[in-house]
Amino acid sequence: MASWIGMINAVQRGPQVKQTAELVISVVTITRAALTHSAIDLRKELLFDLVSNEGIRITALMDNDVVDPPPDSTLMPEIEAIVKEKLGTDTRFSSRVNGVPGFWISFKIDDDEYWLMLERERLAGLSGVQWLGWAGVVGILSLLGAALISRLVNLPLARLTVAARDIAQGKRPDRLPEKGAQEIIEANRSFNQMVEDLQQVESDRALILAGISHDLRTPLTRMQLELEMANLSTEARDGMQSDIGQMDAIIGQFLDYARPTEAASFVPIDISDLLGDVGRAAERIPGMRVTADIEPGVHVMGNATDLRRVFNNVVENARRYGATPGLDITELDIACHVKTNGGIKRVAICLQDHGCGVPAGQIEQLKKPFTRMDTARGQANGAGLGLAIVERVVGRHNAALTVRNRDGGGLQVELVMAVVL
């Protein structure tokens, strides 16, 4: 704004000085010519017309006139120089004569000297109100321009923030557009490359994990055969078979964790029947008591094998660590109900045990691979991938997973998915 005001002053100064000086010279010259060439008896009417129509007052210049200095303006010295060059160096200027304000300038007709007064409004430049108006217009335009530039800058940053948040949540964001300012292009290009590198690392890790786990199955099978043929005591045989079984279960978890799930394989699934099968299978496990409250006929899009693996992992987690305090059994509640929110139907699937639960501050740790809350959930024999597999599969199904402690004790795992109508 300061630069704009300075520019306007610099550009306006010269033309305003010239225009004002030419106006004064023109008015004085024409008025003097009119008075000189008019009849004496008509001069009064001429003076009256000049005052009423043009705002020009003519009075005789007296020696006893009370004359104030010229108008206090930065342009006045330059105006005076131009006017005196045309009208004579004895031309006088005043801002007030005998108490009457105006723009006063003297001139001569023969030996007589007169004052000519112009209204100041005819000579004034931009007023304070006009300056304020122009400043307001420029200020609004500046704000609009700043808002546009800010949006152009902030939109890519906001898009980058959303993509970074998706990365933090384990999702793969859409590719960022590589256009705009050079800095934005470089940032988006680097981020896209980082996403591709992370995806490649994830794929390599899953491939290596699956390969190692698969290769370990062969020696385990051979050990199992040799164990059956070995001449061992029943106690030693049972212990070694238990160890081999645990190793095989851990390898199975590795394979489940590394196995990809493609959305192209999703089909409509009767989740009610699937949960019913899981519940009936859980009831056949010694020491398990299952209570089911499942709404029939609920369908979702997904992979039945992976979803069954999710529910089986939660059931196995409850069997191992969710025994009801004071009892030798594990109580498991399975619920499935459709809820409508904002016109959208979703199914809420809840599996909960009645055990001791886990410390509230460590619940999120349960979802991380190779993590076990041994102090809260008893001694673990697995690899700590149960809930990590659950979260991985749930994320690929665009579902919401919530893990929290159950009111009254125990751990509650809730899965919310969109319903297929």
Image: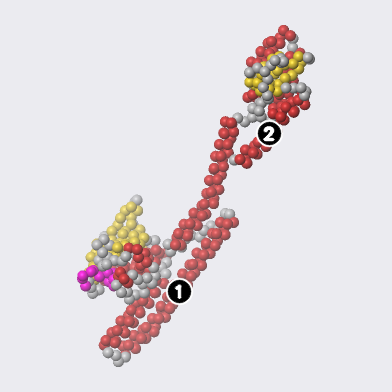
Say if residue 406 shows up in the picture.
Answer: yes
Classify the position of the C terminus by image quarter. bottom left
Give SS at disc 2.
helix
Which region shows up in magenta?
317-328
Which amino acid, mark 2? Answer: Arg
Outermost residue toward the top in this view: 41
Image height of 401 relative to 343, above or below = below
Residue on which disc 1 sits: 207
Outermost residue toward the bottom in this view: 231
Image height of 399 relative to 214, above or below = above
- The picture places residue 50, in percent across and down from the top left corner, at 67, 16
Which residue sits at x=35%, y=65%?
Answer: 362
- Relative horizontal placement of residue 106, taking residue 201 as reference (left or right): right
- The picture places residue 301, in percent across and down from the top left corner, at 36, 62
Q: Nearer the viewer, residue 61 or 155?
A: 61
Give SS at disc 1.
helix
10 Å crowding of disc 1: few (<14), some (14-19), many (20+): some
Which amino acid, mark 1? Answer: Leu
Q: Quadrant of residue 348?
A: bottom left
Residue on which disc 2 sits: 13
Residue 321 lies in the magenta-colored region? yes
Which residue sits at x=52%, y=49%?
Answer: 151
Q: Nearer the viewer, residue 210 or 359?
A: 359
